[in-house]
Image (cartoon, coloured by chain):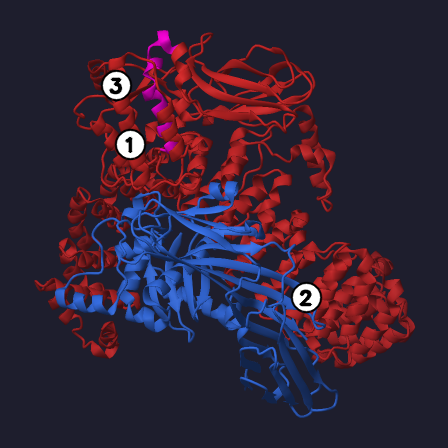
Amino acid sequence: MIHSLFLINASGDIFLEKHWKSVVSRSVCDYFFEAQERATEPENVPPVIPTPHHYLISVLRHRIYFVAVIQSEVPPLFVIEFLHRVVDTFQDYFGVCTEAAIKDNVVVVYELLEEMLDNGFPLATESNILKELIKPPTILRTMVNTITGSTNVGEQLPTGQLSVVPWRRTGVKYTNNEAYFDVVEEIDAIIDKSGSTITAEIQGVIDACVKLTGMPDLTLSFMNPRLLDDVSFHPCVRFKRWEAERILSFIPPDGNFRLLSYHVSSQNLVAIPVYVKHNITFREGSSQGRFDLTLGPKQTMGKAVESVLVSSQLPRGVLNANLNPSQGTYTFDPVTKLLTWDVGKINPQKLPSLKGTMNLQAGASKPDENPTINIQFKIQQMAISGLKVNRLDMYGEKYKPFKGIKYMTKAGKFQVRT
Amino acid sequence: FLRDYAALLSPAAFPPHRHDDLKEMLDSNKDSLKLEAMKRIVAMIARGKNASDLFPAVVKNVACKNIEVKKLVYVYLVRYAEEQQDLALLSISTFQRGLKDPNQLIRASALRVLSSIRVTIIVPIMMLAIKEAASDMSPYVRKTAAHAIPKLYSLDPEQKDQLIEVIEKLLADKTTLVAGSVVMAFEEVCPERIDLIHKNYRKLCNLLIDVEEWGQVVIINMLTRYARTQFLNPNINKTFYGSDEDEDEDEEEKEKKAEAAAMAKRKPYVMDPDHRLLLRNTKPLLQSRNAAVVMAVAQLYFHLAPKAEVGVIAKALVRLLRSHSEVQYVVLQNVATMTIKRRGMFEPYLKSFYIRSTDPTQIKILKLEVLTNLANETNISTILREFQTYIKSMDKDFVAATIQAIGRCATNIGEVRDTCLNGLVQLLSNRDELVVAESVVVIKKLLQMQPEKHSDIIKHMAKLTDNIQVPMARASILWLIGEYCEHVPKIAPDVLRKMAKSFTNEEDIVKLQILNLAAKLYLTNSKQTKLLTQYVLNLAKYDQNYDIRDRARFIRQLIVPTEKSGALSKYAKKLFLALKPAPVLESPFKDRDHFQLGSLSHLLNAKAGGYQELPDWPESAPDPSVRNVEVKESVRAVGTVTYRNTGAPRGPQQTEGSEESDSASGSESGSGSEGSGSASESEESGEVSVSEEEEGEEEEKKTKKRELKKAVQESERSPTHFEGFINLLFSRGFLFSVRFPSLNVDFYLFLPVEPAPSPQVTPVNNLLSNSLVTDLEGLSLSEAVLSPAVSRNASVFLALKSYELLHRITGEGLSVEYCFSRQPFSPDANMVAVQMQFTNSSTSDTKNLHMEDVKLQSGMRVKDFPEIESLPAGETATAVMGIDFCDSTQAANFQLCTHTRKFFVSIQPPVGELMRPVFLTENEFKKEQGERSFKVQ
């Protein structure tokens, strides 16, 4: 399946290579560089590139290209999904997945890659298993190892590998037993010129941080499970229980994991928590344009809209912008023509606005494209769909765990067309 | 501190005798120095630096005690062994020793490295090691063996036959850990040996949900191919009635369908239960977090499911569009192919394909493709409105693609053709030349459909030749003017004049079109254009490009009559001005579905190496009985209760290092999935079943019962290990001996000997389910049943679990429940007695209750219950029927008929109900045990 892996940084250097079968010369990456040159933007490099003898399948994460070399038929998603899993694992181990972090931990990276694939076929990809095989580097452990010469590598086969719950380590012990669940919902929306919604949907996830001793068996139920239209589960969730009773029943992995992603059925009208009043115009024959933007909250159920960030790609003809924000700060990058306005919190009494003029290149004609406005925001303590967790129960262990549930709503891909 | 290495590793840090320090460190006695040296070497390998000269120094450390050093040495060995084959042989003996290590991790990693060393000499050693590991007691080592198979195969394809034997053996393995890896090996070594799958098909289907994600993908893809060879096309019937979805099919396909329909007429289609099993067991995986799994299931449904059921995949695929852009890219390609065949499926999700300005261009273009495929009369206005916004985008490649898309919508949907054309004409005044050029090309294609109505557009376009520089657009305009010169008789010669002037500076495609224009004008309007044409032809005669010179010569001969130009010139007009059919604007994704969806070949639209064609459905179904398995296996396979399928919370089980784990466990475990009783149930049944026996025994039995109950409870409380539970049973001395009636195979579970015997058979059971415990409990506690004489009377004491056969509402007042009465069925000893209870809660009498139309798996038999003549309203009646399940958990399907209605019902037994307790004395048991103790494996 996967023959080799090359990691390529933004400036086009191959800074790590790993082969699982015969060595493939790194010159194969030339085909990748060619494709990269043809693509105008980094994210426009095709994920699958055929070459005379190999196929290159790549993903771009954190400005690093992970290029897998394969030789014969394999489902492309299989490779792509695996590469993303590799990145997630690195992030899990080193906190960040940057070139520097990978270079600093090159031996651990190599040991991880060795465990994750055997002959190009995934062997162990569960974080709980990997962590038993190879301990994540911490400052303390690195120091102890240097002094005592002990290692990061486990000597026993991780118990999870053989059990029916491969995602959970055995022998977990905590003094404080706690389970936290974050319900995070994102609104994806396209709003048209006149302010009416073209499409809006809510996607949510439940991220969990579970630190419980032993083998707890948890069930989580919702007040209104009917809201969930389409769900995808962590492998620990039992399908049958969900299908029959709409209850999430699972033996959780140890640590952080994504329990569930869901989509809220589109029949329910989506509440759009912000509105935008905009007036962006260019006049024919004049080298100036007007820019006028006002934000306001709506349907927020009394919760504050925070961390608002507005960004917009202005037309190529715009030289600079002379704007005046009523709150927050704005920047305009004259090279990429990207305007960003860090608004902060929206105060319903005093609506934030950004007004002023844009200067066009002298003699340039009026741009015929209209910029799109992208908005990011957060609303704490609210799930916009109204989803509510009913209760969390634990079976199988005797102690009383501390349980916590947090709700949050964020903007996903939230665009306003002008 | 690794950063320091990086500094050391820069080329300047290594003098000519580089690596001397590393060699010294490797030779030292200290593990810490060795480790540091190895870390530096691995860092070199990672950066692609050559470290092969260290081979002798490194290979010495292969037997190092320190496990991390050892692992890094392995990394090094695998990387360089191919280059230094002789030296690599030095390490082989270490691995051979490792293969015998008591620690399974060490055994496995020894095999991993041994099989990864690509040295041909050791092929026999590898073969031996793989064979041995394939029967290792640790499933992890067996998994490693499965991984090693393709490695050896790529090293020496001659070994194929032997490897197939190993694959066959491993395919029979029952652990989820091995399943994915061995199917992977199967796919790489012998994908054509579909016959190896038959016996394992049902097991694979049932295990699927608990296999790790990557294995699931491989298994699902393989089963898709398998199903295509073994089952009938489920859509054959429907085509007979004509389906609205296949509007654009060509003649050929229709013919094929007619044939198929004729066949369907002969025999009504009934889906093979195994086909159904596959569809049913893969469906929940649409909810997987892994995009590859979701895609695999989606393609399985697309290729195998009846039309009415394919719809379920749309939602899951749309969900994947939220994922990383690479995932979106692949998913959209597949959706694009699907939307051509099954448009209706994605129509409700139209808006999910709307384009955002932040999408990468390649995603935008794919979404556009999907939107175009989804366009129909009802939604076209929404889609066109959406397209209007896209045209204003800053991304010009995307705008060009949008214009193409509008063109396609216009050709496909006649109603909007004029609207689209007007919109495109407006774009001709766009400031961006690329936009104009693309519009010209598309307008040209649209005009060809009805040129007479649009001469003004042609005129407008003629004017554009002064400004437009894009060659393709210029060529298109010239072609249009030439083709329709009769509609624009005044302008055409003038355009030719201008073109003649600039001829030498034009691109090749434009020159060719100028020649065409000249020829057509010469034929229609030779008075005005004769000289111009001669001039252009002369210019072309001396052009650099030979295509153009050729074309000029060809045209001259045809249109300018000379003595030599034979008969052809008479037909010149017919040749040049023939009516040309309008181009069909087709999706590039049309007919891509002959590749298996989700595959690399589908994505590239070209066959990739190692691609296995998706076979066509067979004309008639091959023998389904090849998938039947002997009872032992079938119980194991069908009854396997998997983690994700059960509702009851159960703990994980360990099988670490226990030799017997597999042999004992797999065989007796399992139960029907619905029967998985909960803890409380099992407790209750323990309590209720008080048997009427003599005082003395009663007492003893009660204690036992209590103990058993306690054991069950304890096991519930510490759900970690059934192992513990079973050991507990052992220590308290319970025996179950179970007999499969028709096979005369006995299974001994537990032994009632005090003190507990040494667990000859340690039932470390990773599959045993609560429900089985419940079932078995019933067996042990009602010992009265054991002696056949009393059994009839005694059975009443059992708290029998009853199942619903027909619900009151579906049965229109008639409800039926059944239970396994656990009595011998007198008419036929091999049958299981099923006691049915009919309740009539309707207001009228029900008459002539009987059963009909029994559908069974091969080998199964049924004895009908005697017909109930009449069941008055509000009354209840019971009847007993017998079913020989053939020791499988296959369902028995039949119709329950009343005088007015028929109801389809089915009975599926939990495994526990298929066993019968047999009473043995200790000595008898031991004797039997000695004879055939677990020769199951």
Q: Secondary structure at mark 2?
A: strand
Where does the image place residue A414, in percent across and percent down from the top left? 59, 69
Whether residues under marks 3 and 2 lie with C-beta atoms below 8 angstroms apart, the answer is no
Q: Colour of chain A?
A: blue
Q: Secondary structure at mark 3?
A: helix
Q: In this figure, which residue is indicated by the disc labeled 2?
A: A197
Q: Chain of mark 2?
A: A
Q: Is residue A382 above or below residue B851?
A: below
Where does the image place residue B707, in percent across and percent down from the top left? 26, 28
Q: Which mark is residue B301?
A: none
In the rendered image, residue B773 lying in the magenta stretch gets the answer yes
In the rendered image, residue A275 lying in the magenta stretch gets the answer no
Q: In this figure, which residue is indicated by the disc labeled 1?
A: B710
| Image quadrant where one finds the N terminus of chain B | bottom left
Residue B466 vs residue A18: left or right? Answer: right
Amino acid of disc 1: Lys
Amino acid of disc 3: Glu
Whether labels 2 and 1 belong to a single chain: the reply is no
